[in-house]
Image (cartoon, grey):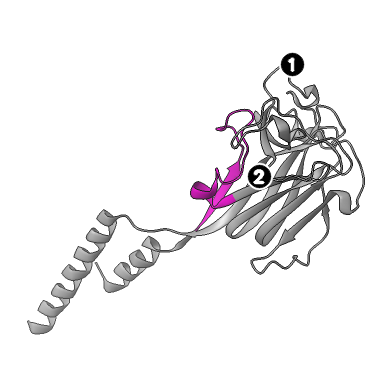
Amino acid sequence: MSFKYWMILASTVVAPLASATTITFDELDNGTRVDDEYSSSYGVTFNGYNVDKNESNLAVVFDTTLNNTADPDLESPFTNINNPSLGTSNPGNVLVIHETPSTCDASTCSNPDDEGSRPAGYFTIDFSESVTLNSIDFFDVEYDEATSNNAIHLFDIDGDELNIDEFYTPYTGGNNTWDRLYFDVADVYSIEINFFGSGAISNIDFTSATTSVPEPTTLAVFAMGLIGLVSARRKQRNS
């Protein structure tokens, strides 16, 4: 093999790779308080702040497949009246800003239900590195307006708000409806999603740039190949 080939192989082994991720919350139990559950796997942390109750750490999993819950408006299936081509959604778990902090312990809340006060509160989503935010699904959003009460803010790694078109939590049509908001915005390090009333999110889709670290066996084979190549070139010069 030529020296050029080995250099190409080396660049392939350690080249940065784009990694697409969708967080669905489906592996968590109903009522789980979500904060650092996705920190080790995806470098993502969550917080839900309830403005009416003036309390944080209230981003809570709601299982939409259950019946007779505290919020039947968030029970599947969901129809899409804004983009019917996206069809009906059965998202499984969604994330709500829980309305009753007194039902919570350190890790879970009983009878999860979304806060319906005006304004309800906001989610913050922080990434360990800048990502491209692709899309987020929204459920049971009842208020149609474009004000600070339902604004979505995107921040860069320095904490500065990105100079882009404004985004707002979309009006899905109210009870048992959903819609998908597309962003396609790069260099996002943090998100703040405001809710004027009830609602939930899921399927947070983003793309991060990560470095592919070669496994030890790959490094060993690569090193042996380089040693063999150097040895062969020396023999050629000495012959």
Where the N terminus falls, by quadrant? bottom left
The label nearer to you, 2 versus 1, is 1
Q: Amino acid at mark 2?
A: Ile
Looking at the image, which is closer to me, 1 or 43? 43
Compared across the picture, whether 106 is left or right of 194 comes to left
At 62% from the left edge and 51% from the top edge, which residue is drawn? Answer: 206
Find residue 72 and report its image quarter: top right
- Residue 27 on the magenta span: yes
Is 26 left or right of 95, judged from the image as shown? left
Q: Which residues are magenta?
A: 17-44
Q: Secondary structure at mark 1?
A: loop
Q: What numbered label is drawn on residue 68? A: 1
28 with respect to 10 (left or right): right
Residue 62: image location, x then y, percent: 68, 30
Q: Nearer the viewer, residue 184 or 166?
A: 166
Question: Label for residue 33?
Answer: none
- What residue occupies the far front of the structure in this picture? 102
> From the image, which quarter does the C terminus lie in?
bottom left
Where is residue 61? Give x, y as percent: 65, 33
Q: Earlier in the sequence, mark 2 or mark 1?
A: 1
Residue 187 rendering spot, x and y as whole percentages: 65, 63
Instruction: Check disc 2 and report the residue beneath it.
Output: 204
- Would you say residue 233 sits in the magenta stretch? no
Q: Which of the pair 23/58 is nearer the observer?
A: 58
In the depicted structure, whether residue 155 falls above or below residue 181: below
Give the quadrant of residue 90. Answer: top right
